Image: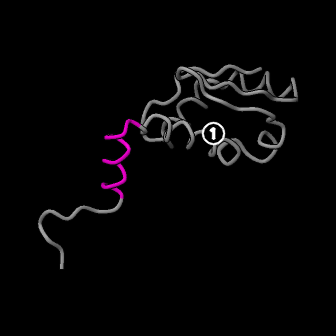
Amino acid sequence: MRKPNDITLKEGIGKLLNVYKLKGKFDETTIIALWPELMGVAIGNRTTQIYIFQKKLFVRIESSVIKNELMMVRTGIIDKLNERAGSEVITEIVFL
């Protein structure tokens, strides 16, 4: 039986991340982990390095053809990543 002050595990973890100011880093880690899943196997296999610094996602891709294609759909990728994270984690993508 639930008591009136009980909260769900999801709410508890969310409060914990907010109190210790870890929410931003947790969201960034989520974005990096989701990159291969959201972008597909071909792009995921050709991505050699990915990191986030000051709300910019830096992605190193081996193939120049894929890099040019991704530059054209940059805003769509940003929207998709932020939607999956649940908040605005990325404002810009830099392809290296």
Please identify the quadrant where the C terminus is shown.
top right
- Most extreme residue toward the left is 4
- Most extreme residue toward the front is 20
Q: Within the image, what quadrant is residue 60 found in? A: top right
Q: Residue at x 34, y 62 (%)?
A: 9
Q: Is residue 14 left or right of residue 60?
A: left
Q: Which stretch is magenta?
A: 10-21
Q: Residue at x 18, y 74 (%)?
A: 2
Instruction: Give the labeled residue for mark 1.
Output: 32
- Local secondary structure at mark 1: helix
Query: What amino acid type should be assigned to the residue bearing mark 1?
Result: Ile
Q: How is the image coloured?
A: one colour
Q: Residue at x 53, y 23 (%)?
A: 55
Residue 94, percent from left and from top = 68, 19
Whether 84 is among the magenta residues is no
Residue toward you, 17 or 87: 17
Residue 40, percent from left and from top = 73, 46
Q: Residue at x 87, y 23 (%)?
A: 64
Principal secondary structure, stretch drawn in magenta: helix
Residue 33, percent from left and from top = 63, 45
Q: Within the image, what quadrant is residue 75 found in? A: top right
- Most extreme residue toward the bottom is 1
Q: Within the image, what quadrant is residue 50 found in? A: top right
Please identify the quadrant where the N terminus is shown.
bottom left
Whether 15 is among the magenta residues is yes
Residue toward you, 42 or 90: 90
